[in-house]
Amino acid sequence: MSKELTAEQKQVLDMCHRVIREIKKVIIGKDDIIIKVLLSVLAGGHVLIEDIPGVGKTTLALALSKALSLDYKRVQFTPDVLPTDITGFMVLNRNTGKFEYKKGAAMTNLFLADEINRTSSKTQSALLEVMEEGRVTVDGETHHVPDPYVVIATQNPIGSIGTQMLPESQMDRFIVRLTMGYPSFQNEVEMLRSKQSHVSIDEVEPVATAAEVSNAVRVTEEIFVSDPIFEYIAALAAETRHHDLIKLGLSPRGTIALLKITKATALLNGRSYVLPDDTLYAFKDVCGHRLLLSPKAKMNGADINSVIAEVTKNVPVPRVRA
């Protein structure tokens, strides 16, 4: 195992630092969220953001697309959005007499599914199938999504009228679930001050290309993982499945997602190999939406964060030399 970053790994790390600097121009005081979204991109995954309106979810997605030079589309989900609006449809070309495929909104590099819980379960399933398969099939014709491909979906937890919350099996398609939350007092003051100086999304500069993002996903996949780390991830997953406060533990898909995020975290920390801290950094974000608490947990007043903290405490941390 070489401890030195390769030339490609250094290029990806430099690209990440440039992207973070650009996004921080418009997203103030949420460095941790910016990093975790970028980790998800490096891991080739999709992001679910659950939060109230007005905390910057859309701005974050738009800033990310600009910094990475990605084609970007957004759909405000409502009950009348149809599956074909997402996947596309066939239409007759009167000049040729043949049916042609018209792309749906999801056929882009970065797709923002805003308030995904406010549309029908059929439309939700259409998008989640695209996320999982990386392609759509319309009237027997298969069309692959662009590369890279990232979906950022948002859910508003306030107000349940007319909503279809994603079931656990579909939540599992997102590599992480994040919450931005309110800014701190000082960060909100800084935000107000920046608005007076007319800092807008137009200030975000493209600092990477779509091809560089695709290459970054490949480079991240090649980060070295030792056997103790594989065993540590498997042990954490096993603990969620046997914990008496958890009804539904981490799925194998969730275990793979944790491995991918772990590799991305190691690279962003400037290493070509993984340490246990890389696994723990986003463990809550990878697992929180995949676990179901048991009735016993609710009776004991335990929440998902406290249970996850107990899981990590119960599993011995392996000794891996830096």
Image (spheres, rainbow, N blue to C red):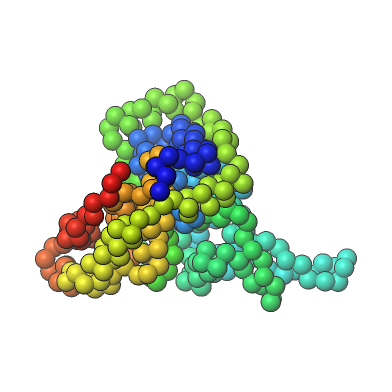
Classify residue 237 by image quadrant. bottom left
Picture coordinates of residue 144 (x, y %)? 64, 63
**Residue sitting nearer the eye, 49 or 260:** 260
**In the picture shown, does residue 58 fall above or below 316?**
above
Instruction: Specify whether 300 is left or right of 69.
Output: left
- Residue drawn at x 72%, y 70% is 90
**Residue sitting nearer the eye, 168 or 79:** 168
- Residue drawn at x 67%, y 70% is 142
Instruction: Specify whether 49 is left or right of 92.
Output: left
**Residue sitting nearer the eye, 23 or 165:** 23
Q: Please identify the quadrant where the C terminus is shown.
A: top left
Q: Which residue sits furthest bottom? A: 140
Picture coordinates of residue 200 (x, y %)? 51, 32
Classify residue 56 by image quadrant. top left
**In the picture shown, does residue 48 fall above or below 234?**
above
- Residue 96 in view of the camera: yes
- Residue drawn at x 32%, y 53% is 279
